[in-house]
Image: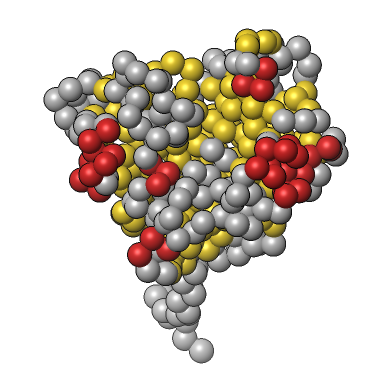
Amino acid sequence: MVERANRPSALNAPAEATPGPQVDITGTGPSSKVIATLPSGESVEVLLYGATVTSWKSEGGKTENLWLSEKAALDGSKPVRGGIPVVFPVFGPPPKSGHATSSLPQHGFARNSRWEFLGKSAAEDALDASSVKLDFGLSTTELSEEARKAWPFDFGLVYSVTLAKDSLQTVLNVRNEGEESFEFQVLLHTYLKISDISKVAINGLLGVSYVDKVLNATTHQQSDASVTITGEVDRVYASIPQDTTTVLEDGKPRFDVVRDNLSDTVVWNPWIEKAKGMGDFAPDEGYKQMVCVEVGAVDGWQKLEKGEVFEGGQTMKSLL
């Protein structure tokens, strides 16, 4: 048999295309939401009303990481109780007078405005099957007339939600698109779902000063390595030196919350009486299955001049 010097190699069958993340838009009007699912089953749901993340499932879609009230309004009638509401441009009740945010409702307008879905973004990295990034936008033109009158500045917000196998990243980009400077605060009001509040400890805040809203807004210093919750808690921890706060349950790490360019964290649990007093909080004993660890810039004000941009966010890791 004669050997051929340039015998053709065997033809390689084309490799099957790797399935990518699936992104769907469901519902109409204020109830519209975007659902992204990885091929491995992890998912995130974002309501266009408030760009509120209402669900984040890890472990192949088996474990829900966010607490959502059974009575949460998902029809655009009021801000969502649970998930991750976006607080902008003021945290809590606004200053009574003398500030540009004074005419706004508590927590501002971002959480009760309808955002625009800007699409699946691959601007920073080539997205693969292990992650998907969703972008949402809100600007002056999308605001209600009432909100524009109360806060008459030209701005643009882009909120990016990136789902990976064991993490969820949420980042807010704020741009001053007008001629005047403006001041603002921002907070991501995350409701983490846990099994038993009595077994929860929050680490990473030792030595940090905080304002205790339960104790007449007095200032204290965190003297214990762990924050434990045995009653109503509403604390604003400011200028935290380390980036990571860890939520443990029954002594085992459950979540890491990693801040990016946001120096403050609010820890909140309404406990028994306050939970009963909120009409959209259900069940009444739901406080046992949630704890809010909310990253933000709320100690003082951020200021943007014409054309300037601020960006900050968080990466939450499920540690199961």
Please identify the quarter of the rendering in which residue 40 is found.
bottom right
Apparent side of residue 143 relative to residue 301 in the rendered image (left or right): left
Q: Residue at x 47, y 67 (%)?
A: 22
In the image, residue 260 above or below residue 121:
above
Apparent side of residue 37 relative to residue 153 in the rendered image (left or right): right
Q: Nearer the viewer, residue 268 or 258?
A: 268
In the image, residue 312 lies at what x, y percent? 43, 30
Note whether residue 217 is visible. Answer: yes
Which colour assignment does the render follow? Answer: secondary structure
Q: Residue at x 63, y 10 (%)?
A: 219
Note whether residue 261 is visible. Answer: no
Q: Nearer the viewer, residue 275 or 143?
A: 275
Q: Residue furthest left?
A: 179
In the image, residue 208 above or below residue 171:
above
In the image, residue 250 lies at what x, y percent? 85, 39
In the image, residue 42 lies at what x, y percent? 59, 59
Please identify the quarter of the rendering in which residue 308 is found.
top left
Q: Nearer the viewer, residue 257 or 66?
A: 66
In the image, residue 42 above or below residue 162:
below
In the image, residue 144 lies at what x, y percent? 27, 46
Apparent side of residue 49 relative to residue 154 in the rendered image (left or right): right
Q: Residue at x 24, y 38 (%)?
A: 148
